[in-house]
Amino acid sequence: MTALKPQTDQTDRSRPPSLRAVMVPISGLLIAQFVAGLSATIVATSIPSILQNLDGPTAHSTWIVAATILGNTASIPIWGKLGDRFNPKGILQAGLVFFAVGSLVSGLAPTTTQLIVGRALQGIGLGGVLALIVIVIAALVEPRQRSRVNAWLTSMQTTATLSGPLLGGLIVQTPGLGWQWCFLLSAPAATVSIIVIAATLRIVRTPTEPLRADFAGAGLIAVGVTALLICVSVLPTLNDSVVLAAVTGGVGVIALVAAWFVELRADDPILPLRLLAARTPLLCITAAFFAGTTLFGGSVFITQYLQLGVGLMPATAGLLLTPMALGTVASAFVAGRFISRTGRVRPVMVAGALALFAGNAVLFLMDFSPTVLAVTGTVLIACGLGAVLQNLTLTAQTTVPFSIVGSMSASVGFFLTLGGAIGLVVLGAVLTYRLDALQASGSTLAEAYFEGMPLLFGLSALLVLPAIGAILALPPVQLRAYRAPDA
């Protein structure tokens, strides 16, 4: 198998250097994580302005967000496999380059179609960033201390994710700027991360076996996921899109069934299905998928509710989401401290999953006090995400040799982002159907948003229940104080 280790002169090479020794390269990873989180939601409060200034149908509004998630979902297993086979430093930098190019294409787009293409390129780059960061952290940091670094990464990403709507609103409202700068600002940030990583990160990859690329599996997964999401997105306008829904739905099902058989037979599969079928990985990916369905609702849908339903300005709506960032930072750091002291992961994830459910339940009731309950519900969701997401990956990593930790991490990330993409598209389709029905019965657009939006969070609360069940079923995991060498 291949060997991956930090460059160090320690006699015991199975034990990584201390956190203090790797803080500078970790800072480059934190910058990359911040850029990744910011790009997902900075567009949320600027979508109305984009649709007013670019040629394209209103239905493109969901895909301006979903394209990035889809690119991330389809590409992250490929990036994880490349990280297992080659030097992860170079692969991570390649992901950042993809992201920077996608940011420029998005910012210079003359139509919503080109914008969606740019956002998809951003998503492909983000797949590389998110997959490779966990591989690099696994190489640099011992397992128990890894939970602390994961807390930093979760805090950085979620803070960026949740501050995105506020920053996007300020950019749109600032004279002399415009929605384009929601994308153009990402390119220099990605460049800074590339420079820091190039100058400070030292990881050696010594390949001892040839790469057996699973291009068939990668292509089938990408086609299947994309086709099914397109099918779901056109269901609210089924009378006008029967052929498109039938074709994309059929292609999606056939492609994913074929991918299942290809991955089972592949020598070096993109998604190691046999490995994922073991109890702990299976429960981790199940929890990741269903927790992921609520990943973007707290920012994307709430900002629309506050702007279009309650009547707040974009920057004000974004500002009300700031407490989410504080909740995520606090929960991630508390979780990281607890895990680093005790080595126990499951209690933290159980508490986080319950917070996810409670947050969505509160948002389901937000008509009774829109502003107060919107803030309360989103803070609970943020606390839940901070405690659950990175720790699911950490738990799954304990089940495999270090030589394939990238594939395992990317697999959990794949199902997490797949859940996020499906949750966003499905809930967006439900919202479109609900808005059309309410407006057809005589409601104004504002009344339709105010009355129709809470239903989405009731559905989202139900989707969290399987995640709670999967986490409760996880066997207890006691993290080691340092990584043992592969057998």
Image (cartoon, rainbow, N blue to C red):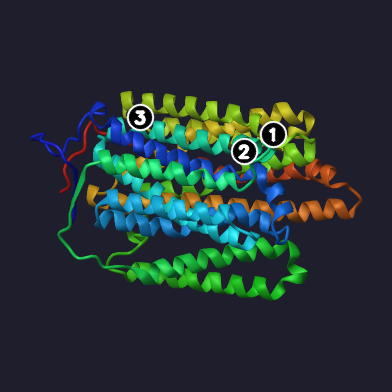
Circle nearer the viewer, 2 or 3: 2
- Say which residue label 3 marks: 148
Label 3 crowd bin: few (<14), some (14–19), many (20+), radius 10 Å:
many
Q: Residue 206 sits in which quadrant?
A: bottom left
**Marks 1 and 3, the one that precedes in the sequence:** 3
Q: Residue at x 32, y 39 (%)?
A: 196
- Say which residue label 2 marks: 165
Relative image position of residue 440 (x, y in whole percent):
88, 55
Q: Quadrant of the N terminus?
A: bottom left
Disc 2 from disc 3: Cα separation: 27 Å
Q: Residue at x 31, y 46 (%)?
A: 135
In front: 224, or 281? 224
Q: Which residue appears farthest toward the right when viewing the image?
A: 442
Q: Which residue appears farthest toward the left when viewing the image?
A: 11
Relative image position of residue 455 (x, y in whole percent):
73, 44
Circle nearer the viewer, 1 or 3: 1
Callout 3: helix, strand or loop? Answer: helix
Disc 2 from disc 1: Cα separation: 8 Å
Q: Amino acid at mark 2?
A: Pro
